[in-house]
Image (cartoon, rainbow, N blue to C red):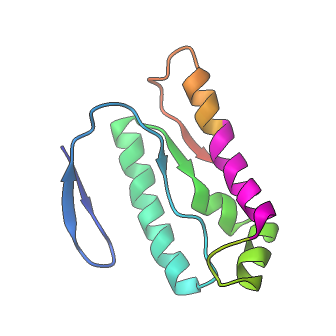
Amino acid sequence: DLTVTAPSSGTTSKATALHHYAGLNSPAVGEDEQNDRIKATNTAMREEAERLIVPFVDCFEATSTNALWRRQVSAGDGYHPDAAGYELLAQTVTTPVLDWLNSPSNHSPLVQSQ
């Protein structure tokens, strides 16, 4: 069993890991306080993925440091980019997940930060 606690609310839930999966976290948004919460959750998710030896793709790190993503999110509603931003997000997720799925042994961990 895996116990997950949401940092902002303290809510705890249990889940059973039945097979390897690709863990993804939230991308960066236009609000600094929300990004701080996402970053804290990101750290916990990365550590748990490493502990469980399951794949993890770091969408927050990839988007929080990308000028295109930040510019597009800021120009819109603070959460959603335009098509080019979603293309960046798709590339962030697709390449490491496909590499992991196509690896000779997909039992090795994927902890990816771009």
The chief SS type of the magenta part is helix
Tell whether position 83 is magenta. Answer: yes
User: Foreground: 112 or 100?
Assistant: 100
Residue 53: x percent and y percent?
39, 34
Disc count in the image?
Answer: 0
Q: Residue 93 versus residue 36: which sits nearer the camera?
A: 93
Which quarter of the picture shows residue 67?
Answer: bottom right
Residue 57, position in %: x, y?
Answer: 55, 47
Say which quadrant the N terminus sits in. top left
Please state the horizontal and vertical placement of residue 38, each as a whole percent of the image. 49, 70
**Span of residues in magenta:** 82-95
Q: Residue furthest front?
A: 83
Can residue 114 be spotted in the picture? no
Is residue 69 visible in the rendered image? The answer is yes
From the viewer's side, name the closer residue of 111 and 11.
11
Q: Is residue 101 above or below residue 37?
A: above
Residue name at image x 49 percent, y 23 percent: 106
Please give left or right for residue 21 compared with residue 68 in the image: left
